[in-house]
Image (cartoon, rainbow, N blue to C red):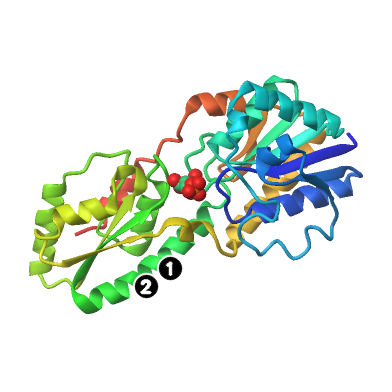
Amino acid sequence: MKRIAVLTSGGDCSGMNAAVRAVVRAGLAANIEVIGIQKGFQGLIDRHYELLSTKSVSNVLQRGGTFLQSARCKEMLQSAGQRLAAENLNGMGVEGLIVLGGDGSLAGARSLAQQGTAVLGIPASIDNDIPFTDISLGVDTALNNIARAVDNIKDTASSHDRAFLVETMGRNCGYLAVVSAIACGAEYSLIPEEPYDLEKICQELRHRYQQGRTNSIIMVAEGAGNAQLIAEQIKDKIGFETRTIVLGHYQRGGSPTVFDRLLGARFGQAAVEKLLAREKGKMLGIKNSKMQLTPLDKVIKAGIRPIDELLPRLSKALTI
Ligand code: F6P
């Protein structure tokens, strides 16, 4: 193998730079040229790319986002776009491609694999909704961002006897909301995986207010409802004054945690090693701390990674 390429696609996440850096360094160490494709699959379709050197990846490890930039590419959803992407890779002399991204990006990678491209995927999405890996790149940094925000919110909430509804990202997955509820001592986490009874929550919050508790935090996964609308429904029933905060894209940025730097380094290096071992059409994942490969087809067909049922149980058990 003489030349490989790497791209970051879909919603960015912290740790992508660490992974691309590892791809470049592992590639160069094996005497392989590494091409960086800009703006994900869009760059592949538009042929926007550059040869990467150690200099290209110096000083990026600690930076959030992705220096290669990312995009959500509509053309890649169509077979014409997928064909053009595969043709362009051939034209660029690329013998192996590494795709970092979430479920949509991995579906794009599968479409290239189906056309014969040697492609490997790295699960990278704050949502932690990708199956066949215990954790995706960027999740740990996002959780730390959320924890920092909720800790701050708790301070001001306590000064004013307020309840805060804190909306997290995650699409249809409640992982960020439930884990941050445990990590920050929130009273509730409303997640799409579990039904919730708003009337019961109101009664319990009112009781809490009457007991003289100074604050309440309700984490709301974006897939479980709109925090502002829920606030409207509960605000006159719970005693506490109610406020809402939507954390939004704040969760996705920032310097990656050591966990994400290490995970990015491991994924990037392993991706090159596996391509050289002629593995293709698969996604890397971490299971019980060990690297594993799963066919992209299986990953896509499995849909959303189910939430560990211990997490909502733990979150509830710690709320009294
Ligand atoms: O998939 C990552 C994610 O941040 C989701 O949690 C969120 O719903 C979505 O992307 C936001 O997408 P965009 O950055 O395109 O607004």
Residue 152, label in figure: 2
Say whether residue 265 is left or right of residue 128: right
Assign a secondary structure to mark 1.
Answer: helix
Where residue 161 appears, as percent x and y from the top left, is 18, 73
Q: Nearer the viewer, residue 270 or 13?
A: 13
Q: Against 146, is 156 above or below? A: below
Q: Against 254, is 304 above or below? A: above
Where residue 22 appears, as percent x and y from the top left, is 75, 52
Q: Which residue does the image show at 66% across and 51% down from the upper left?
A: 69
Q: Which residue does the image show at 83% across and 45% down from the upper left?
A: 34
- Residue type, numbered disc 1: Arg
Q: Mark 1 near mark 2, Cβ–Cβ under 8 Å?
A: yes
Q: Quadrant of the N terminus?
A: top right
Q: Badge 2, how many Cα within 10 Å: few under 14, some, many 20+?
A: few
Within 8 Å: ligand 1 and the Cβ of disc 2? no
Instruction: Report the residue marked by disc 1.
Output: 148
